[in-house]
Image (cartoon, rainbow, N blue to C red):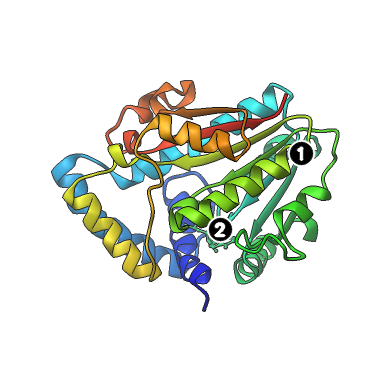
Amino acid sequence: MTRSENVSPTAYATGHMWYRLGLADAALSTVRGRVLDRAFSTLALPIKLTTGVAFDDLMQARHQGIDAQLDAAIAAGRVTQVIELAAGLSPRGWRFRQRYGHDLRYVETDLLHMVAEKRRLLARAGRAPAAQDLCVVDVLDPDASSSLARVAADLDPTQGVAVITEGLMNYLSPAQADQVWRQIAASLKRFPAGVYLSDFYLRGENSGVLMALFSAVLQRFVRGRMHVHFETLEEARDSLQSKGFATVQIHAPGNLPSLADLGRRPGARRVRILEAWTGL
Ligand SMILES: C[S@@+](CC[C@H](N)C(=O)[O-])C[C@H]1O[C@@H](n2cnc3c(N)ncnc32)[C@H](O)[C@@H]1O
């Protein structure tokens, strides 16, 4: 199993979690996911009891925050195509296809075995997308035949594109993350409008003994280090601009109108939503 594949079991946990939080129906929930989600929730309980930071609120804010900014980009007419990297068992692709029908092209990608598992689960629910809309991209292998650039090359070059990552970047080393952000910016620049949306964390907002303990357990589970890449907003903005993004906004969930209530909870204040546009 490669280092990347070690991360994949977490996708089973979130696949069930989105269902438990009411953000998905049962199609992408698995027994394995339910067991892992319960284990992570148990581990996160002492943090909630002692600091008020609920892991569920953080996860819900990140998922709905990305949804909100994607909806806004589509509503503004800037984006009609989406590539989600490391989509795991996330229901977003299915939800957005349902919501926008033929007005939106939504391509979900992940590693080979995860794509196969998602296709199997979706086919069982009678909703498997076309092969080209659920396909393999290894973000750490940009020269592969199944790279982000290749998937982007199949999109309509006259229409705007969103690229999404959720729950991926913190498993990558700083050098790997830099390479992925450069890849994303370079791919988006080929389109009249390009936006990158992701969950985002700052070291300054995620310190404390219990948080360190929780992340230590997660690191043991994925058998690798986790990285919070930036200390401050300024450092993050400068770095992303240097990778090729023209404008970089790092939203607090509480400042997004549709997340006002959820966004004020302590858990939701630990995560940010990155919205970075290329060009024009
Ligand atoms: C924590 S899960 C997040 C899944 C989904 N985005 C969500 O939020 O529910 C991390 C995902 O990253 C994927 N992944 C890990 N390494 C990857 C790589 N090198 N290229 C593409 N995907 C990768 C895993 O297979 C897994 O599905």
**Residue 71: x and y, percent?**
62, 30
Report if residue 128 is visible in the image.
no
Q: Distance from label 1 to label 2 (Cα)?
A: 20 Å
Report if residue 214 is visible in the image.
yes
Of residue 26 and residue 118, the one placed in the foreground of this image is 118
Mark 2 lies on a secondary structure that is loop
Mark 1 lies on a secondary structure that is helix
Task: First in sequence, mark 1 or 2: give its number.
Answer: 2
**Is 102 situated left or right of 35 in this image?**
right
What's the mark number on residue 101? 1
Q: Is mark 2 within 8 Å of ligand 1?
A: yes
Of residue 150 and residue 267, the one placed in the foreground of this image is 150
**Is 58 situated left or right of 197 in this image?**
left
* The furthest residue to the bottom: 1
**Residue 152: x and y, percent?**
77, 48
**Is 270 situated left or right of 150 in this image?**
left
Q: Amino acid at mark 1?
A: Gly
**Residue 106: x and y, percent?**
72, 45
Q: Residues within 10 Å of mark 1 (few under 14, many from 20)?
A: few
Name the residue carrying label 2.
89
Of residue 276 and residue 29, the one placed in the foreground of this image is 276
Of residue 226 and residue 110, the one placed in the foreground of this image is 226
Q: Is mark 1 within 8 Å of ligand 1?
A: no
Residue 156 location, quadrant: top right
Q: Residues within 10 Å of mark 2 (few under 14, many from 20)?
A: many
From the image, state whether disc 1 or disc 2 is nearer to you.
2
What's the mark number on residue 253? none
Residue under the point 58% across and 32% down: 276
Q: Amino acid at mark 2?
A: Leu
**Residue 216: x and y, percent?**
27, 61
With respect to residue 153, does 173 lie above or below?
below
